[in-house]
Image (cartoon, rainbow, N blue to C red):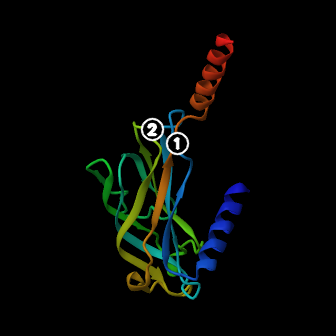
Amino acid sequence: MARVAVASGLLAAGAAIGQSDRLFFEVSNDIGPSRPSAVVTLWATHDPRDFAVAAMGGGLEASEGTWSDIAIVPPMDGPVTTPGTVVDARRVEGIIAGQLHFIGAGIYADPSNPIAVWRGEIEVLDFTPRTIGLASLINRFDVYVSAESSFIDSRLSTLEQAAGTIRVVPAPASGAILVLGVLTAAGRRR
């Protein structure tokens, strides 16, 4: 139920912006000493006049950190798909995601809008407060234009690439311990 609410909220956010063919990131949490990594999901929306996202290809990058556990999210994990390859720790190249839509064979694409496409985990080792930039580098974005056919068309020219950030925050407990230590030291001086 919560997953549906999140997807509905993401769709409303995409509609409010007024951009139909668009990519965006969802980040699971801030990064800090108690949670040194975050799961990043790449979502895609398509023009409501089209039926479904058919295929997407390219890459993405973070301004720092190390990617791991990369995967294509079902149903975008059709034949010949790949989550790509981690390059230089912070960049992923060669992502190929897609789903089938062959009516004659009884295979139907998922028309969800937005639809999750790719997921990966990013980790950092330095918890100095800052933000880590995220950017998609997609060079292919195709849609199924109709529920009644398997015809696809490129929407790369209208695609808004994803850009996002991950916050790196110090542990809240460490700040509280520091304040408690200062108050204890002040109390001993009296």
Q: Position of residue 130 (x, y in %)?
A: 45, 48
Locate residue 39, reporting x and y percent.
Answer: 50, 49
Picture residue at 36% right of the left edge, 70% below the top: 138
Q: Residue at x 43, y 79 (%)?
A: 159
Do tag 2 and tag 1 residues touch (Cβ < 8 Å)?
yes
Identified at 49% across, 75% down, the residue is 22
Residue farthest to the right, as pictured: 1
Instruction: Label 2, secondary structure: give it.
Output: loop
Residue 55 falls in image quadrant: bottom left
Look at the picture and state if 118 lies above or below 48: above
Q: Amino acid at mark 1?
A: Val
Instruction: Find residue 118 and report its image quarter.
Output: bottom left
Q: Closest to the observer: 124 or 2?
A: 124
Name the residue carrying label 2: 127
State the separation of the CA atoms marked 2 and 1. 6 Å
Amino acid residing under circle 2? Phe
Q: Residue at x 54, y 85 (%)?
A: 50
| The N terminus: image quadrant | bottom right
- Work out which residue is located at the far front of the displayed protein and give it: 190
Q: Is residue 186 above or below residue 36?
A: above
